[in-house]
Image (cartoon, grey):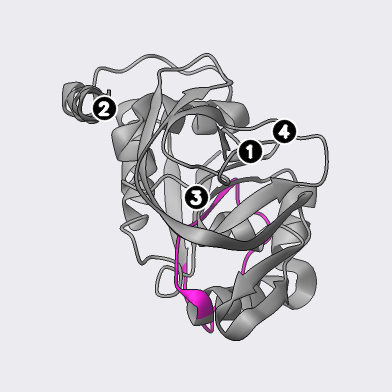
Amino acid sequence: MTFTIVHLLPELLGTYGDRGNVEILSWRLAKRDIEHEVLTIGVGDKVPTTGDLYLLGGGEDDAQIAALEILGKNDSLKKALENGAHVFAVCAGFQILGTQFPASGGRMITGLGLVGIETVSAKHRSVGELLSRPTAPIAMLTGFENHGGQTRFIDDLEPLGHVVSGIGNGQGSNIDGLMTQQIIATYMHGPAFARNPELADLVLSRKIGPMSLISSPVFDQLHDERIGQVE
Protein backbone atom coordinates (compact mmCIF):
# COMPACT_ATOMS: atom_id res chain seq x y z
CA MET A 1 0.00 0.00 0.00
CA THR A 2 1.09 3.59 -0.63
CA PHE A 3 2.21 5.57 2.43
CA THR A 4 0.52 8.98 2.36
CA ILE A 5 2.14 12.13 3.76
CA VAL A 6 -0.27 15.04 4.14
CA HIS A 7 1.46 18.43 4.14
CA LEU A 8 -1.00 20.80 5.76
CA LEU A 9 -1.38 24.44 4.73
CA PRO A 10 2.21 25.36 3.79
CA GLU A 11 1.13 28.85 2.70
CA LEU A 12 0.02 29.49 6.31
CA LEU A 13 2.34 27.22 8.29
CA GLY A 14 5.57 27.40 6.33
CA THR A 15 7.30 30.53 7.60
CA TYR A 16 10.50 28.93 8.85
CA GLY A 17 11.36 26.42 6.14
CA ASP A 18 9.42 23.55 7.73
CA ARG A 19 8.41 22.50 4.21
CA GLY A 20 11.84 20.85 4.15
CA ASN A 21 10.57 18.20 6.58
CA VAL A 22 8.33 16.85 3.83
CA GLU A 23 11.25 16.70 1.39
CA ILE A 24 13.40 14.79 3.88
CA LEU A 25 10.69 12.24 4.64
CA SER A 26 10.05 11.66 0.95
CA TRP A 27 13.79 11.22 0.29
CA ARG A 28 14.19 8.72 3.12
CA LEU A 29 11.19 6.70 1.98
CA ALA A 30 12.44 6.67 -1.62
CA LYS A 31 15.87 5.46 -0.49
CA ARG A 32 14.13 2.46 1.05
CA ASP A 33 11.95 1.86 -2.00
CA ILE A 34 8.83 2.49 0.06
CA GLU A 35 5.98 3.57 -2.18
CA HIS A 36 4.56 6.88 -1.01
CA GLU A 37 2.77 10.03 -2.06
CA VAL A 38 2.73 13.60 -0.76
CA LEU A 39 -0.58 15.45 -0.65
CA THR A 40 -0.14 19.19 -0.25
CA ILE A 41 -3.32 20.65 1.21
CA GLY A 42 -3.71 24.36 0.68
CA VAL A 43 -6.27 26.93 1.75
CA GLY A 44 -9.56 25.99 0.11
CA ASP A 45 -8.69 22.30 -0.25
CA LYS A 46 -10.58 19.63 1.65
CA VAL A 47 -8.46 18.12 4.42
CA PRO A 48 -8.37 14.32 3.95
CA THR A 49 -8.91 12.10 6.97
CA THR A 50 -7.29 8.90 5.64
CA GLY A 51 -3.62 9.96 5.41
CA ASP A 52 -0.84 8.19 7.28
CA LEU A 53 1.30 11.12 8.47
CA TYR A 54 0.25 14.78 8.77
CA LEU A 55 2.80 17.61 8.99
CA LEU A 56 2.23 21.04 10.51
CA GLY A 57 4.81 23.82 10.45
CA GLY A 58 5.35 27.26 11.96
CA GLY A 59 3.59 30.52 11.21
CA GLU A 60 2.69 33.99 12.44
CA ASP A 61 -0.38 34.81 14.57
CA ASP A 62 -2.98 35.51 11.88
CA ALA A 63 -1.81 32.60 9.73
CA GLN A 64 -1.87 30.30 12.77
CA ILE A 65 -5.46 31.29 13.56
CA ALA A 66 -6.52 30.82 9.93
CA ALA A 67 -4.94 27.35 9.93
CA LEU A 68 -6.74 26.48 13.16
CA GLU A 69 -10.09 27.42 11.64
CA ILE A 70 -9.47 25.25 8.59
CA LEU A 71 -8.26 22.24 10.59
CA GLY A 72 -11.09 22.55 13.11
CA LYS A 73 -13.72 22.57 10.39
CA ASN A 74 -15.46 19.19 10.37
CA ASP A 75 -12.90 17.98 12.97
CA SER A 76 -10.75 16.80 10.05
CA LEU A 77 -7.50 16.34 11.97
CA LYS A 78 -9.27 14.71 14.90
CA LYS A 79 -10.92 12.25 12.51
CA ALA A 80 -7.55 11.50 10.89
CA LEU A 81 -6.10 10.61 14.31
CA GLU A 82 -9.12 8.44 15.03
CA ASN A 83 -8.39 6.67 11.73
CA GLY A 84 -4.89 5.84 12.96
CA ALA A 85 -2.89 8.72 11.46
CA HIS A 86 0.24 10.18 13.05
CA VAL A 87 1.11 13.89 13.32
CA PHE A 88 4.41 15.78 13.39
CA ALA A 89 3.99 19.42 14.40
CA VAL A 90 6.45 22.30 14.76
CA CYS A 91 6.06 25.55 16.73
CA ALA A 92 2.72 27.14 15.71
CA GLY A 93 1.52 23.72 14.60
CA PHE A 94 2.49 22.36 18.03
CA GLN A 95 0.48 25.10 19.78
CA ILE A 96 -2.59 24.58 17.57
CA LEU A 97 -2.91 20.98 18.82
CA GLY A 98 -3.45 22.12 22.41
CA THR A 99 -6.30 23.75 24.31
CA GLN A 100 -5.23 27.38 23.85
CA PHE A 101 -2.51 29.66 22.52
CA PRO A 102 -1.87 33.43 22.61
CA ALA A 103 -2.18 35.86 19.71
CA SER A 104 -1.50 39.55 19.13
CA GLY A 105 -3.55 42.11 21.03
CA GLY A 106 -3.67 40.01 24.17
CA ARG A 107 -6.02 37.49 22.60
CA MET A 108 -6.21 33.89 23.80
CA ILE A 109 -7.29 31.48 21.07
CA THR A 110 -8.97 28.14 21.74
CA GLY A 111 -7.00 25.35 20.05
CA LEU A 112 -8.02 21.99 18.62
CA GLY A 113 -7.74 20.29 22.01
CA LEU A 114 -6.17 17.16 20.57
CA VAL A 115 -3.53 16.94 23.30
CA GLY A 116 -3.35 18.14 26.90
CA ILE A 117 -1.21 21.26 26.57
CA GLU A 118 -1.79 25.00 26.83
CA THR A 119 0.37 27.83 25.56
CA VAL A 120 0.56 31.28 27.15
CA SER A 121 2.59 34.38 26.39
CA ALA A 122 6.17 34.36 27.63
CA LYS A 123 7.92 37.39 29.16
CA HIS A 124 10.77 37.06 26.70
CA ARG A 125 10.82 35.60 23.19
CA SER A 126 12.78 32.37 22.81
CA VAL A 127 15.20 32.76 19.90
CA GLY A 128 18.33 30.75 19.20
CA GLU A 129 19.81 27.30 18.96
CA LEU A 130 17.98 24.53 20.81
CA LEU A 131 19.71 21.34 21.89
CA SER A 132 17.90 18.54 23.72
CA ARG A 133 18.50 14.99 24.85
CA PRO A 134 15.67 12.88 23.39
CA THR A 135 13.50 10.59 25.47
CA ALA A 136 13.54 8.11 22.56
CA PRO A 137 16.74 6.13 21.86
CA ILE A 138 18.04 8.40 19.08
CA ALA A 139 20.86 10.93 18.73
CA MET A 140 20.89 14.34 20.41
CA LEU A 141 18.34 16.72 18.88
CA THR A 142 19.26 20.08 17.41
CA GLY A 143 17.14 22.91 16.03
CA PHE A 144 16.48 26.63 15.95
CA GLU A 145 13.65 28.02 18.07
CA ASN A 146 11.79 31.28 17.55
CA HIS A 147 8.59 31.61 19.55
CA GLY A 148 6.89 34.03 21.92
CA GLY A 149 4.83 31.47 23.83
CA GLN A 150 5.54 28.95 26.53
CA THR A 151 3.78 25.61 26.42
CA ARG A 152 2.75 23.74 29.57
CA PHE A 153 1.53 20.19 29.99
CA ILE A 154 -1.90 19.94 31.60
CA ASP A 155 -1.88 16.15 31.27
CA ASP A 156 0.84 13.66 32.18
CA LEU A 157 2.79 13.71 28.91
CA GLU A 158 6.22 12.67 27.72
CA PRO A 159 8.47 15.41 26.27
CA LEU A 160 10.33 14.85 23.03
CA GLY A 161 13.57 15.93 24.69
CA HIS A 162 15.20 17.33 27.82
CA VAL A 163 16.80 20.70 27.03
CA VAL A 164 20.58 20.93 27.21
CA SER A 165 20.81 24.41 25.67
CA GLY A 166 18.03 26.85 24.76
CA ILE A 167 14.51 27.25 26.11
CA GLY A 168 12.16 24.71 24.51
CA ASN A 169 8.61 24.61 25.86
CA GLY A 170 9.23 27.41 28.36
CA GLN A 171 11.71 29.05 30.68
CA GLY A 172 12.43 26.65 33.53
CA SER A 173 10.59 23.71 31.95
CA ASN A 174 13.83 22.11 30.71
CA ILE A 175 11.90 20.18 28.07
CA ASP A 176 11.02 20.52 24.40
CA GLY A 177 8.01 19.22 22.54
CA LEU A 178 5.99 16.14 23.36
CA MET A 179 5.45 12.54 22.36
CA THR A 180 2.20 10.60 22.48
CA GLN A 181 1.35 7.36 20.70
CA GLN A 182 0.39 9.29 17.56
CA ILE A 183 1.82 12.80 17.93
CA ILE A 184 5.36 14.16 18.01
CA ALA A 185 5.75 17.92 18.38
CA THR A 186 8.64 20.31 18.89
CA TYR A 187 9.78 23.92 18.78
CA MET A 188 12.74 22.93 16.56
CA HIS A 189 12.99 24.52 13.13
CA GLY A 190 15.90 23.86 10.87
CA PRO A 191 14.12 22.02 9.22
CA ALA A 192 13.98 19.52 12.09
CA PHE A 193 14.36 16.42 9.92
CA ALA A 194 17.28 17.82 7.94
CA ARG A 195 19.14 18.45 11.18
CA ASN A 196 17.96 15.23 12.87
CA PRO A 197 17.76 12.31 10.43
CA GLU A 198 17.18 9.81 13.23
CA LEU A 199 14.12 11.81 14.31
CA ALA A 200 12.78 11.59 10.75
CA ASP A 201 13.17 7.82 10.82
CA LEU A 202 11.60 7.61 14.28
CA VAL A 203 8.50 9.44 13.04
CA LEU A 204 8.23 7.15 10.01
CA SER A 205 8.88 3.92 11.91
CA ARG A 206 6.14 4.61 14.45
CA LYS A 207 3.64 4.23 11.61
CA ILE A 208 5.45 1.97 9.13
CA GLY A 209 7.31 -0.29 11.54
CA PRO A 210 11.01 -1.22 11.55
CA MET A 211 12.92 0.03 8.52
CA SER A 212 16.31 -0.67 7.02
CA LEU A 213 19.15 1.69 7.92
CA ILE A 214 20.33 4.11 5.27
CA SER A 215 23.50 6.12 5.01
CA SER A 216 23.02 9.88 4.73
CA PRO A 217 26.42 11.48 5.30
CA VAL A 218 25.28 14.99 4.36
CA PHE A 219 22.52 15.00 6.97
CA ASP A 220 24.72 13.32 9.56
CA GLN A 221 27.39 15.96 9.00
CA LEU A 222 24.86 18.79 9.36
CA HIS A 223 23.60 17.26 12.59
CA ASP A 224 27.09 16.91 14.06
CA GLU A 225 28.13 20.42 12.99
CA ARG A 226 25.09 22.01 14.62
CA ILE A 227 25.64 20.16 17.88
CA GLY A 228 29.30 21.11 17.84
CA GLN A 229 28.43 24.80 17.44
CA VAL A 230 26.18 24.73 20.50
CA GLU A 231 28.43 22.61 22.71
- Mark 4, Cα crowd under 10 Å, few <14 / some 14-19 / many 20+, is few
**Count of marks placed on residues:** 4
Between marks 4 and 2, how big is the CA–CA gap? Answer: 26 Å
Nearer the observer: mark 4 or 1; the answer is 1
Q: Residue at x 66, y 59 (%)?
A: 119
Residue 32's spot in the image, x, y percent?
Answer: 36, 25
Residue 102's spot in the image, x, y percent?
Answer: 63, 71
Q: Quadrant of residue 47?
A: bottom right
Quarter of the image with the N terminus is top right
Q: To which residue does mark 4 refer?
A: 181
Looking at the rendered structure, the kind of residue marked 1 is Leu
**What segment is highlighted magenta in the picture?**
41-61
Is residue 152 shown above or below 14? above
User: Which mark identifies residue 65?
Assistant: none
Looking at the rendered structure, the kind of residue marked 4 is Gln
User: Which mark identifies residue 223?
Assistant: 2
Q: To which residue does mark 3 refer?
A: 5
Looking at the rendered structure, the kind of residue marked 2 is His
Looking at the rendered structure, the kind of residue marked 3 is Ile
Between marks 3 and 4, how big is the CA–CA gap? Answer: 18 Å
Between marks 4 and 1, how big is the CA–CA gap? Answer: 10 Å
Nearer the observer: mark 3 or 2; the answer is 2
Secondary structure of the residue carrying tag 3 is strand
Q: Compare residues 74 and 33 and report the one nearer the observer.
A: 74
Q: Earlier in the sequence, mark 3 or mark 2?
A: 3
Q: Which residue occupies the extreme front position in the image? A: 123
Q: To which residue does mark 1 refer?
A: 178
Quarter of the image with the C terminus is top left
Q: Compare residues 36 and 105 and report the one nearer the observer.
A: 105
Secondary structure of the residue carrying tag 4 is loop
